[in-house]
Image (cartoon, rainbow, N blue to C red):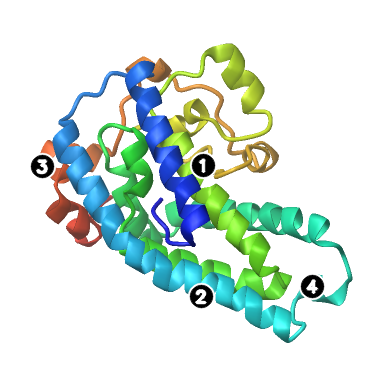
Amino acid sequence: MFIVIGDTGNDFIYGSIAIFALLEVWSPRRALKYSVLVRWSSNFSLGFINIFVNFALFTVLGIGAAATVGQNDWGLLNLVSWPSAVEIPLTILVLDCAFYWEHRLLHAVPVMWRAHLVHHSDLDIDFSTAVRHHPFEVFISVGFIIPIVAALGAPPLGVLMFLIWRAIFANFTHANFALGDPLDRAMRLLIVTPDMHRIHHSAIQSETDSNFGDLFPFWDRLFGTYHAQPANGHAGMRIGLDYLDNPRQLWLDRLLGQPFTNPP
């Protein structure tokens, strides 16, 4: 995910992209089947468009909403006097849970799925897939999360830190590099790993409709959507959507038009 949130935050986010890209070269998890030139040019062009949407909506409205509720003592956290060391982690936890449910709605509600399917129509998966979101999806996400920020009374620093970590994790969980099974099993007890999230991009719908979490894996475990391994293994798993599996769909003009197609 591309997002404009200040020099320090951007350094962390773009630095993570460089690190994960190098890890993909050093230790790839899957062999890529389709043109990297076409995929990267389309995915990053879409990501570039979303820089402006993300800044205008997520950064300005998200953090602005948090500042407004703080100034007016609105929201649950403004009814108590907890230290920042409690409020900030709690904000990150609540927002991650909220985005888990938003992600499930993106799959369950047809009009929302039309915006989200662009992210799933990539026929390979690597770090560039993290920025492959239609601008319409960003509008949906902001409309979903702003009321939660207001009701929680989330501190601006907590919202900012969540946005930074969510962007870094998006790059991490989509990256095509091998952690190794022992390390993956240990890490996914605490965080979402690339192997865990990759299953979510499977062409098999029961696997697509699983592993919705962004940062933490326990929402999927708690709410019954956790899927440990793909049926055909990671090397044999087919990525994408059956009805958008033409390589021509990897081009930017098709990505922008996919929400207006007629998916089943």
Are discs 3 and 2 less than 8 Å apart at CB? no
**Helix, strand or loop under label 1:** helix
Are discs 1 and 4 less than 8 Å apart at CB? no
Residue type beneath disc 4: Leu
**Helix, strand or loop under label 2:** helix
Residue 195 in the image: above or below residue 89: above
Residue, disc 4: 76
Are discs 4 and 3 less than 8 Å apart at CB? no
Residue at image location 39% in from the left, 61% down from the top:
112
In the picture, the disc for residue 120 is none
Give the CA separation, mark 1 to mark 4.
27 Å
- Residue 177, image x and y in percent? 41, 23
Residue type beneath disc 3: Arg
Are discs 4 and 2 less than 8 Å apart at CB? no
- Residue 67, image x and y in percent? 64, 77
Total numbered badges shown on the rendered structure: 4
- Residue 162, image x and y in percent? 60, 55
Residue, disc 1: 169
Residue type beneath disc 2: Leu
Give the CA separation, mark 3 to mark 2.
36 Å
Q: Is residue 208 visible?
A: no
Residue, disc 3: 248
Q: Which mark is nearer the camera, 3 or 2?
A: 2
Q: Is residue 78 left or right of residue 11?
A: right
Give the CA separation, mark 4 to mark 2.
19 Å
Q: Earlier in the sequence, mark 4 or mark 2?
A: 2
Q: Which mark is nearer the camera, 4 or 2?
A: 2
Give the CA separation, mark 3 to mark 1.
29 Å
Give the CA separation, mark 4 to mark 3.
49 Å
Q: Earlier in the sequence, mark 3 or mark 1?
A: 1
Residue at image location 45% in from the left, 30% down from the top:
199
